[in-house]
Amino acid sequence: MLPYRSPAEAAPVAPGPLQLDTDQPLGGQVQAGLNLWLPLKAPVQMPALLATIASMQPEVDDALGSLDYVHFARFLPSKDFTALWVITTYDGDLQPYIMDFVGVLGDVFTSILYFIKEAPPLPVQRYAREFVDFIVRHNINVPKPWSAYPALTVIDIQMLEARR
Amino acid sequence: MTVDLADVQGLVRGYGPRFEFARHFILGIRAGAGARSFVGGLAAGTLGDGLKVTTAAERSREERPSSCLNIAVTWPGLNELEVPDGVLAKFPPAFRLGPAVRAGVDPRKPNSVGLGDVGNSAPDRWRVGGPNAPEVHIIVSLYAQFEDRLNDVSGWLREAFDTYGLTEHCHRDARALRDADDGSSRVHFGYRDGIAQPLIEGIPATGGPDMQPPVPTGDVLLGCDYENSFRGNYAGDLPNALVDNATYGAFRILYQDVAAFEDLLDDWSKAAAADRELIAAKLMGRWRNGTPLVLAPKMAGSKPPIVPEGDLNAFDYAPNDDHPAFYDDAQGLRCPIGAHARRLNPRGGRVMGKSHSRRLVRRNMPYGPELPSGASDDGEDRGLVGYFLCGDLETQWEFIQATWVNQDLATHGIRRTREPIGGAQPAGGGTFAIPTNQSPGPIMLRGLPNLVITRGSAYCLLPGIGGLRHLASRSGSNGGTS
């Protein structure tokens, strides 16, 4: 392989007599919320469901980290154990990226949906379109989440962090 | 993964640089029964000399004739072929609705251009596939080594069209552009073409190493228990007899405004005080001779740099597991984040979503006469015509058009910009950012016009050979039992 590594790359083009700008994002918030409401077949199964989720936590963490668009995610049982909430904050539009969830979290969602009332056919990888429809139907649309940095994506933040 | 290459249409594997000519026949069906006979005859090779669908198994020069044929069917075409309603309903929405409908922009998103087919690229201006053009049912694509062969086979095909109840709405010719020095194929903008094609699991490689994982077979082919990047199969509940070894194709006719492109290079090279070939390279991510910027970011004296042929596609934008010491171009100092090639195939670079999951097989050739160097626009129609093949039009083709080409969130460093070559630029012109490591930051070049205009499009299914036979049979139509 050619020695392409170059720690001190020279500027490819010297700044010339042109209007300069910085790479500032568009106005408006880039983050949105996914608030999945998943009613259980039987509340008595909630401990088993939570145990299943706990056993898959490392896989969930790796998967979410690999997507580069999820800021936060958590599983939240309702107080009466009738439903599980999946609450995330992510970048961009939901629809184009649902398949990415299927790709990296398909097994996790299949395991969770086993406990859920009127779940789509499983496994979700096999019935991706039905899974997408299910997610859209069970997403409780609320106003965009408040954000202290509305214009920054996960990648923007991590790139800034890397420069520090 | 084993793929029955004899059941896959040859276009999936590709024909390499051998063919100089192509002709796409845009057809309508007058009579379903006749059209089914045509489809079956073309699959079986019973329509006459040279009239047989080429498969991916025919590779060697001895096996391959001096022309190749492929056939694609739209969803309205499947309807005209009398595929049962229950099967038609199982196709994905994008394929069912077609590109003209899918080009519609969501009114709730005032800044969106959807798939980018707006303004001069809007479907009502299309010559193929738009609301003001005849409905497309079948596209037969002929590739030939010599013009005589192209015309001979065209004549035989047209006789068959008449015999089997097909109407030729129009045809679109293409012809390879060759570099005067090395004979490599080029596009009208002057870039070397056809370098980056995905390696597909189960299909013999046609290109060099690309430092990317092979594309899962299911990202390109349907059925047969193939697995796609999302660990499913895009066939869904469609009958295996119809879709095993099929692929979807976005057929596109893309006008290229060469004069505007060359004018842009003049303007921006002055604005940035840089060589116009460097500007061309920054826009594409490769020098016009094909050399990737990541491997060779600077001019070699007064000329663009050259790397060995085998290295043209062997690069990444970041270190990866197999090449942990590879140069990290995270800031785009060598190849701008927004460059055409990087946007459409981010490789291992940071991008939202699952890495390497939206690869397309590109099967396009130039059409129209070359614009002589330095000439102003002559009003001629020229550009690219052909297919972008994939396992799912919405997940791959439309995702790339909507999200990577015409939006600015997928990664950092592209905010307020669209893909510079094929993106739908805003009124007043688009912006392109060239990152530098010098204060005050990136060079922002403005006034980017629309360089590519869509002149036609159709979403097609390219069935496998078995699928074509199934379509032709009574069991594949309403006359049968399935």
Image (spheres, rainbow, N blue to C red):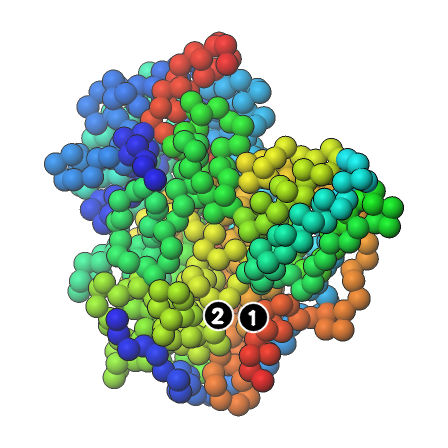
> In the image shown, does B42 or B90 lie closer to the viewer?
B90
Tell me, yes or no, if residue A20 can be seen here: no
Q: Residues within 10 Å of mark 2 (few under 14, many from 20)?
A: many
Q: For this view, does B434 lie left or right of residue A149?
A: left
Instruction: Describe residue A107's horizontal placement relative to residue B244 as left or right.
Output: right
Residue at the spot 45% in from the left edge and 55% down from the top edge: B356
Q: Amino acid at mark 1?
A: His
Quadrant holding the N terminus of chain A: bottom left
Nearest the viewer among B53 and B176 is B53
Q: Which disc is residue B412 wearing?
A: 1
Q: Kindly identify which residue carries mark 2.
A: B337
Q: Are marks 1 and 2 in contact (CB under 8 Å)?
A: yes
Position of the C terminus of chain A by quadrant: bottom right
Q: Residue at x 41, y 31 (%)?
A: B224
> Quadrant location of residue B156?
top left
The location of residue A88, given as percent across then percent down, is: 71, 57
> Residue B190: where, in percent of width, then height?
31, 63
**Mark 1 belongs to chain:** B
Q: Is residue B309 among what the camera can see?
A: yes
Decide which of B133, A91 is in the foreground and name it: A91
Q: Taking B462 as reference, is B258 above or below it?
A: below
